[in-house]
Image (cartoon, coloured by chain):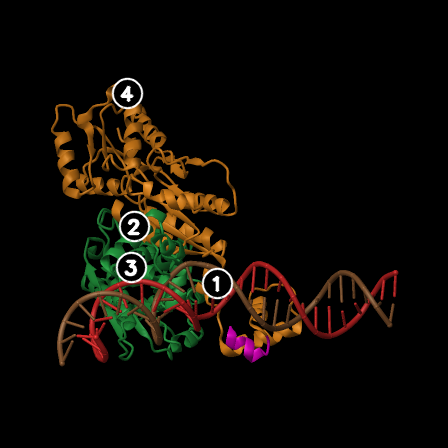
Chain colours: A green, B orange, C red, D brown
Amino acid sequence: MKDVASAAGVALKTVSRVVNEEPGVHPATAERVRAAIDRLGYSRNESARVLRRGRTATIGLVIGDVADPFYSGLSRAVEDVVIGHECLLLTGSSGEEPVRERELVETFFTRRVDGLIVVPAGDDHTYLRPELEAGTKVVFADRPPEAGLDVDTVLADNAGGAEQAIRHLLGHGHHRIAFLGDDPAIYTAAERHRGYRAALGGLYDPRMVSMRPPTLEGVRADLNRMFATDRPPTALFSGNGRYTVTTLRALAGRPIALVGFDDFELSDLLRPGVTVVAQDPSWMGRVAAELLFRRLRGDVGPPEHIQLPVRLIPRGSGELP
Amino acid sequence: MKDVASAAGVALKTVSRVVNEEPGVHPATAERVRAAIDRLGYSRNESARVLRRGRTATIGLVIGDVADPFYSGLSRAVEDVVIGHECLLLTGSSGEEPVRERELVETFFTRRVDGLIVVPAGDDHTYLRPELEAGTKVVFADRPPEAGLDVDTVLADNAGGAEQAIRHLLGHGHHRIAFLGDDPAIYTAAERHRGYRAALGGLYDPRMVSMRPPTLEGVRADLNRMFATDRPPTALFSGNGRYTVTTLRALAGRPIALVGFDDFELSDLLRPGVTVVAQDPSWMGRVAAELLFRRLRGDVGPPEHIQLPVRLIPRGSGELP
DNA sequence: TAGGGGGCAGACAACGTTGTCAAGGCGGCT
DNA sequence: AGCCGCCTTGACAACGTTGTCTGCCCCCTA
């Protein structure tokens, strides 16, 4: 910038004004400055600007794993909103590890992100307190923080979706419905299990429940265990997208009624098509990002807790007798 | 930092030394400083550090679309390498639009990223020249830049993979094999078509080729056109993952031999399983990122052009008669 | 013609770090 | 005892911007 100034024969500040399109520069001078900028191939040093102004125009996003379609859909939506606000996006995958989540968040904070969207992996976010009090805006998506930390959240209707799925299966004559889901320490898994249990009421049987990481062997073993009981399941409800796929693999073609939480590509191409309770990850991302930017614009209302509806899509597997 | 210094009763520079774990600070002093840091909840301002040192410890990644599994797999691998080098990752999706690709790259440059990994959408990268000459390291992944710009590239063996697929189909008795792929302006599509043509030799017939964006209607129309000819195809080769899925939808269960480029989740669960030429997006991401960091460490050898092998995985659809 | 006001330009400090250099104190060696 | 060198610490400038304040010039009005 200094070089541009001397090349154009003006003061540093004048170049700054031109670059920032501030008023009060004579058009002819501005033209001269722009010419010098082009000639020298100058581009503003954003770090210095950030240092001086205090705003980074950068948003941080912490998710479980970009390679998971749920998260990548969410990511893309967040990215679009962020770009629309002339900001950039720092993304990090926690791999669902609380320690890594925290490291990422803290790294983002030292980079002075203006705002943060987090899909939490852990359940202790006291480490956020200082930064929240310092005014950094944080929105939780997909899962809330632990009780006691009242911040903006954008969640899907997990329990409601699970209830819907179970009622659908009950409506097709099933009374013995198994639940295959993730570790109950994961909020969404716990909620979906809660909805499952609520919808089943007196039909609930803990032997028909398997909650653990979705490994093929594990799922296969649990299914075998369930099928070996005196009253085996006639229908399955799987607690998330990866789980549904794993379950399909474990079933190896064995026909049984199945409803899965989360839609996934090709669910319609399988035979039978897989009936799912679909949530919309990009909607969630968009809503979370827009909420964040509203906060950044100065909205200081009480924390919002947005719940997004989910939708049951019958495709065949949930309608088997 | 100033506050920490006065709280600990030492000079600014001493705090800086402690924070950066530089040698030459008395353990007792360091302890006092660390106590003050904890008490005040201080965290280093990375922007100022960047400004002073000139290195941002940030890498930029420009891809087509995070929501596409190929790119998100690549992203995740890049992210892991980047985190391993204590850097952060700025990600942007070009949506395959050259203009947006350029905007993203230039935004990343004004943010002074140390290095850049690009999956190019456009075919004019002269705009990179100044920055390349200024020493910023850039690696192209998945697709090369236009001829004339000799930079590091990491590509898959697109033509070879296509040849392999076609030879596989020829080996199963097919002589009439159609190609369904993306716009030939996209490098990978053009290369795969090249391999297809080379493997077919005299059997090549332009009427059996459809290259256009993968819309369901378009693919369906082209398939109908091909099937309506006097010598309809007995096998299909689809030019990328999304294309394969679209083709499967367009076929609506009609059995015909099919090999697709790119593996995809559930390819094994369809009946018949889908035979594919698989590339490994995370391998590509890892290799590109590692090459980039080698450059950042000062490796100044001539540009490297890495080609990653692909692998044919028979699953049933490619072995139909 | 004198005074006032608006348009334009520049000087300077500050943002929070880090690299360079210099200085003080202390122990060991001659 | 005097000198040297090491260990520890600090002062200061610089990185490239931007916000504030000041100054100049010209035109308009009384």
In this rendered view, identify the residue nearer to me: B200 or B234. B200
Q: Amino acid at mark 2?
A: Ala
Check disc 4 and report the residue beneath it: B201
Helix, strand, or loop for circle 1? helix
For the residues bearing labels 4 and 3, Cβ distance under 8 angstroms: no
A188 in relation to A126, above or below: above
**Magenta region, residue range:** B1-10
Check disc 3 and report the residue beneath it: A18
For the residues bearing labels 2 and 1, Cβ distance under 8 angstroms: no
| Chain identity of mark 4 | B
| Chain identity of mark 1 | B
Main SS class of the magenta portion in the image: helix
Q: CA distance from mark 1 to mark 3?
A: 27 Å
Residue at image x 19%, y 33%? B210
Question: Does A119 appear in magenta?
Answer: no
Q: Quadrant of residue B195?
A: top left
